[in-house]
Image (spheres, helix red, strand yellow):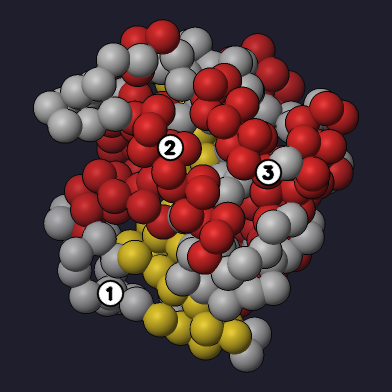
Amino acid sequence: MKWLVNGREAYTYTGGKAFDPTLPCVVFIHGALHDHTVWTLLARWCAHHGFGVLAVDLPGHMKSAGPALESVEAMAEWVLALLDAAEVKQAALVGHSMGSLVALEAAGRAPDRVSKLVMIGTAYPMKVSPALLEMSKNDPLAAIDLVTTLSYSSIAQKPGYPGPGVWVRGGGKALGRMVLAKQGNALLYHQDFVACNGYAGALDAAAKVTAPATLICGRRDQMTPPKAAAEIGTALKARLETVDAGHVLMAEAPDEVLNALRKALV
């Protein structure tokens, strides 16, 4: 579904159902160099169980017009503007990796508009190594390959996992390449990483959040290991759910993540 947000076209996946702003709303926010497709299972479940779903493509990512936004704070303001465009008064915000920081910042900026906060594969601070920042700028395809290697645990190595015909590592690599190529912005990965690396407002935002918070972490996550989420989890007084997966846990442990999300949305 397409919206006009801040004068530019924005795309959201609605889970296979027409969006109804009168239903309890769930907004899904993807991570660096991802798009709405990382949420397909979760978005479809919510849309078919009484929720209105907005799984976003952030500006400059896949189907949403650019330019890409250069800070977590700007992305959070964009999410709140999307709620205005969709005539949504209050929503649950669910974010993965970079998107988890965006969800947190939005919840801190407008606590009355957020009913639940779910941060998946999160960390604070979400620092990116200088080597990876440099690689994402000068050789983004190599950066995609490296991050793919680090983002999926050993349980996801075999083809046909988690079901026949599925290769999550190959799918993850292909998604990054497609998002990078879609709007011809060779610096998109670098911009996303710079936004993660530069975000310093998580604890201030957490102090303003009034919604119940849940952290869903991957036990085998090398990018944002569970211990890296401890400080922000304490600040939010969040419930912690841990699943046996790496960083892109929605792909590696889809049923477990769905179950954790269902509990968080209750």
Kindly report which numbered mark, 3 or 1, lies closer to the viewer in this rendering: 3
Residue at disc 2, secondary structure: helix
Q: Residues within 10 Å of mark 3 (few under 14, many from 20)?
A: many
Q: Quadrant of the N terminus?
A: bottom left
Q: Earlier in the sequence, mark 2 or mark 1?
A: 1
Reading the image, the residue beneath label 2 is 172
Distance (Cα) linking label 3 and label 1: 35 Å
Q: Quadrant of the C terminus?
A: top left
Kindly report which numbered mark, 2 or 1, lies closer to the viewer in this rendering: 2
The amino acid type of the residue labelled 3 equals Pro
Residue at disc 1, secondary structure: loop
Res. 107 image quadrant: bottom right
Q: Residues within 10 Å of mark 2 (few under 14, many from 20)?
A: many
The amino acid type of the residue labelled 2 equals Gly
Q: Earlier in the sequence, mark 3 or mark 2?
A: 3
Callout 3–callout 1 Cβ contact below 8 Å: no
Residue in view at x 51 percent, y 49 percent: 177
Distance (Cα) linking label 2 and label 1: 27 Å
Q: Position of residue 49 (x, y in %)?
A: 16, 53
* Residue 118 shown left or right of residue 260 in the figure: right
Callout 2–callout 1 Cβ contact below 8 Å: no
Res. 74 image quadrant: bottom right
Q: Position of residue 127 (x, y in %)?
A: 79, 30
Q: Position of residue 239 (x, y in %)?
A: 50, 25
Name the disc covering residue 19, or none.
Answer: 1
Residue in view at x 40 percent, y 69 percent: 12
In the image, 244 versus 92, the foreground residue is 244
Reading the image, the residue beneath label 3 is 140
Kindly report which numbered mark, 3 or 2, lies closer to the viewer in this rendering: 3
